[in-house]
Each structure stands twice: as structure tokens, then as C-alpha cells.
Amino acid sequence: MTGSLQIKGDTYYMVINTKNAEGNRKQKWISTKLSVKGNKRKAEHQLNVFLAECGEKGYSEPSKVLFCDYMVKWVELHRKNVQPKTHETNVFNLKKHVYPFFRETGLTLGNIKSETIQDYCDLKLSEGLNPNSVIRQYAMIRTALNHAYKSKLIKVNPCDWVDKPKSKRYVAEFYNADEIKRLLALFRGTSIEVPVFIAAYFGLRRSEAIGLQWSSLDLVNGTLTVRQKIVRVSLEGKCENIISNTLKTDSSYRTLLLALGYSMKEIQDWLGHSNYKTTADLYSHVDPRNKGKMIRGLTSALGEN
């Protein structure tokens, strides 16, 4: 096998010369996606890498499987690598968005182009989909194509030339002290009073609050440790509660404590975070005795006895 660089338009192409089973010469043009100006060395390197890889495993024609069908197989294959809730989200995005779009294009895995993936992202944004949702879908497509690349089903990952959508900062709304008082009063005496109370005081997610067990409590030292969560997932028309010990380490519960005069570092320690983006010192710790001060502050603010 031999190869050379040729210019078509303003782009470098790798021209690959091979022979088929009958010994007939066959030539294939493959775009480097590199413009001519200032990219000659990069194009030469890409050609050399391509020839070296093909020399090790032999050149193969691009995969003929439809890209949409490949995505279905990949999502199921990837299931073991992600949390159940993440898999549920992947399945939803695949069925609702990714599969219908790429099914319509009729493109195979071997012929998927960066332009088509860019068109997909742009279309979803124009349809009013949240940019963060589009980013998750793009990330799913990119990871799937990385798997195809490592499996030598494609020569390059076309997502390398796609402009990822810009994320939209999530701004949550928080209850103030009066609103939390009304919340606790509303659920007082009900079957879910305790989990609501715990969530309000400790900033736990719903899945973390309902995942608590008696073993989570240390009545001697007066502590509560979150070790697991319970999430509800729906797949193939069936709902199931799943216990998981993989927990998120960040939280948005901070407004009320800040309003009461506590520092970010105190709140980070109170909520049990391993790190906090805006905290310069990631590894220092608040004196445990200050947690009592925070309990008293919250109790006073909420009017609890």
C-alpha cells in the first residue's frame, strides 16, 4: 500500500493506492479535514499514521452498517459502563432525537461526516432544545464514535471537527427561610415528614433522602452519613427502584446558609462535598464543632425547637 497527499479545493487529501483480491489497482481519496495553508506537516503526519495503521491491520472498506443502527447497539453495549439513570437518559435521547434524524440521512457508520453531526446539533438548538441537552446528545455520539474508532471501524472520529454547543448555566431557584418554614409545616404529621425535614436541613437530593437507613445514623456522635441512593428508572415500559452507592459530590443547596452568614467553606463541609469549584482551598476542613453552630443557626432561622 502506498499513499500521497493531493490538494482538492483548499483541503489536503490522502490518496491511498491499494490492490483488490484480483490484484487490480484501486485508489481512494480520504479528506484530512485540513486546509492547505500552514497544515502541510500535519497532513503528512496524518498520512504517515494512516499508512502505519493500515500496514498493521490491512486496509478495510468503511463500515456499511447504518449509523443509526450502530448507535442502538452502542447504547446497549455501553449500558454496563454508566448508572441506570444515565442509561435511561441515553435511551430516551436515542429514540426521541438521534435515531430519527440519522435514520432519515441513511448514512452508514463509515460515511458519517462532521458536517452532518454539526447539522444535527444546530437543528436541535433551533428547535428550542436546551443547549445542555444537546451537549449530552453530542457527547453520547462522540463517545460512540470513539468506540468505533478504537474498534477500527472508522479511520477518524468526525466529532473532532464539530463545534460543540455552548453550555447554558443552570440557575436554580431556592426556598428562603419563610418558604422552608411553610414547607415543613405542610408536611408535619405526614408519612414523608422525616425525609422532607432531612432534605431541608441537609440539602439532600430526593434519591439520597429515601436511600437513608438506620445504619446511616450515629446517635452517639450525632451524625448522619449518606452512603447510597435510590433512583427510579423506566426502561422498556417497566419502572424499577434501583439502589446505588455512587453519589454525586456537588450540590446547589447553599443560599439559605449563605444568607445566615456562613462561609462557602463551612457550607462545603456541612454538605459533605469533596470539592467546590469556587473554593480556593480544596483540602482544608472546618472544625467539626462549627456544625453545631450551623444546626443552631438553621434551627433559629426556621423556628424549630
Image (cartoon, helix red, strand yellow):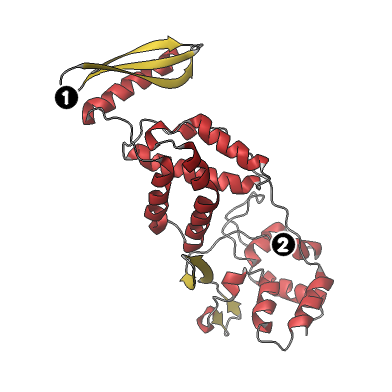
The one nearer the camera, 283 or 90, is 90
Q: Residue at x 35, y 40 (%)?
A: 65
Q: Residue at x 76, y 60 (%)?
A: 173
Locate the N terminus and report the quarter of the image it occupies. top left
Q: State the image coordinates of residue 72 (x, y, percent, origin top left).
A: 42, 50
In what element is the residue under mark 1?
A: loop
Quadrant of the image occupied by residue 265: bottom right
Quadrant of the image occupied by residue 56: top left
As drawn, the label of residue 172 is none
How dense is the environment of label 2, judged by Cα within 10 Å: few (below 14), some, or many (20 and up)? some
Give the CA separation, mark 2 to mark 1.
68 Å
Q: Residue at x 62, y 54 (%)?
A: 276
Q: Is residue 298 left or right of residue 67?
A: right
Quadrant of the image occupied by residue 224: bottom right
Q: State the image coordinates of residue 85 (x, y, percent, origin top left).
A: 51, 62
Q: Is residue 273 above or below residue 103?
A: below
* Mark 2 vs 1, N-terminal side: 1
Pick out the residue farthest to the left: 22
Q: Residue at x 67, y 68 (%)?
A: 203
| Residue kind at label 1, given as amino acid type | Ala
Q: Is residue 243 left or right of residue 217?
A: left
Q: Is residue 168 above or below residue 110?
A: below
Q: Which residue carries the number 1 mark?
A: 21
Q: Which residue carries the number 2 mark?
A: 254
Locate the C terminus and report the quarter of the image it occupies. bottom right
Q: State the image coordinates of residue 172 (x, y, percent, origin top left).
A: 73, 57
